[in-house]
Amino acid sequence: MTDERRQKIDFAFLNAGHFFDHFLILIFATVAVAMATDRQVEISGVSSEWGMSYAELIPFSVAGFTAFGLCSVPAGWIADKWSRPGMIAIFFLGMGSAAMLTALASSPWHLAAALLLIGVFGAIYHPVGIAMVVQGRDKTGMAIAMNGVFGNLGVAAAPLVTLLIIEQFGWRMAFMVPGAVCITVGVCYLIFLRVAHIHDQTYGKGGAKAAGAATLELDRRMLIKVFGIIFFTAALGSFIFQSTTFALPKIFDERLAGLATTGKQVGWWAFGVFAAASVAQLIVGYLVDRHSVRLVFAAVAGGQAILFAVMLNLTGVPALIVGVAFMLVVFGQIPINDVLIGRIAKSEWRSRAYSARYIISFAVMATTVPAISALHGTWGFYALFAVMAVLASLIFCAVLFLPGKHLKLNPAPAE
């Protein structure tokens, strides 16, 4: 097997991992809509098994989302010290098994414990997988964007596939089937690692691919400044991303009026919006490889602030149009912080740099579920959109402090 073919297959597995990471963690977001006593759409064959409302159900996912962030630090550390490919194999097998375990939950608390395990294993992917994606590449924008598209497709497929499985087989199979597929992919990945002879030195500790990675040399003061902006914008952006992706099925349940009257229709609309928004990552990835990161980032954040403000009271077709628009700019922000880290972090500590970014991001994500519950239960989604408009405005202001010329990418040294 040639090095080029091995790299393409490896990249395909990493893309599949990103898909499953977002898909499995978001299954419960749609299951909660289906099981809630206050749902407004018809979902065939589904009853409110535990007699709880949407606002009462979603807090049971908080522990899982918290683990999704907190466990990224030990995952990154182990990957840097042991093996990045090995950790990705554990991710596939562990997250798939946890999803299948969730299907066996007999009470909300059992469900919460199983969702916690999904979060623990799901935390592995971002600090480890993204570090593997950028390794050895001069221009990382398109690679991260392409990988991000698969993550977004996982986000897009979660509500649709979950609702289709629920209507045919019940909510438990919505966890069981994807979990089994994830395990199968993990077994195939293990076989690939053995056949292709991919080992620790391929991706870590200054191995062959590490030598080709382009890294910017910044002084300590500039490095701290850039990381500070990355972490601040990542934190606020994570609240926005999690709020929109988690709540979109319920937003469409309430805001699309006659456009969505069944669970299947809600799922299709959510899939369409998420899938269309995935294109934004490719566009942004292309732009950050060729233009000022500060300019692209500011345009994306400014667009978010405007569109969230416009969305406050919209319903029907206008809500659908603006929903597509704001998801485009929300998804468009995703690769920017990862590109910045890939440019300024050295290979030997890159997984840990990504883990620091993701522990902040996913720790904030964990707060969004109770925030959505509180805001929706008291003021509805009007308040949520108002909060997100303010946060997007803060991101825009922070991005203006990014250094422009210091982030210009230089060619990598020849291998």
Image (cartoon, grey):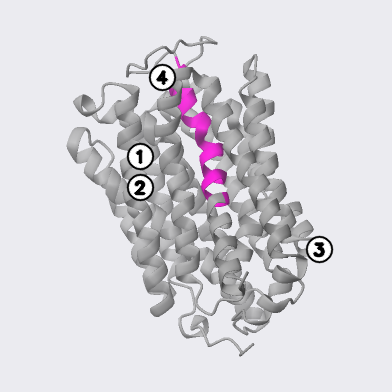
Name the disc covering residue 167, or none. 4
Determine the image quadrant of residue 163: top left
Secondary structure found at label 3:
helix
Which amino acid does the dot numbered 4 rest on? Glu
The answer to whether the residues at label 1 and label 4 have Cβ atoms under 8 Å apart is no
Main SS category, magenta section: helix
Residue at mark 1 to residue at mark 4: CA–CA distance: 16 Å
Q: Earlier in the sequence, mark 4 or mark 2?
A: 4
Where are the magenta residues, as a range? 17-36
Name the disc covering residue 250, or none. none
Name the disc covering residue 275, or none. 2
Q: Earlier in the sequence, mark 3 or mark 1?
A: 3
Residue at mark 2 to residue at mark 1: CA–CA distance: 6 Å
Which amino acid does the dot numbered 2 rest on? Ala
Residue at mark 3 to residue at mark 1: CA–CA distance: 39 Å
Secondary structure found at label 1:
helix
Which amino acid does the dot numbered 1 rest on? Phe
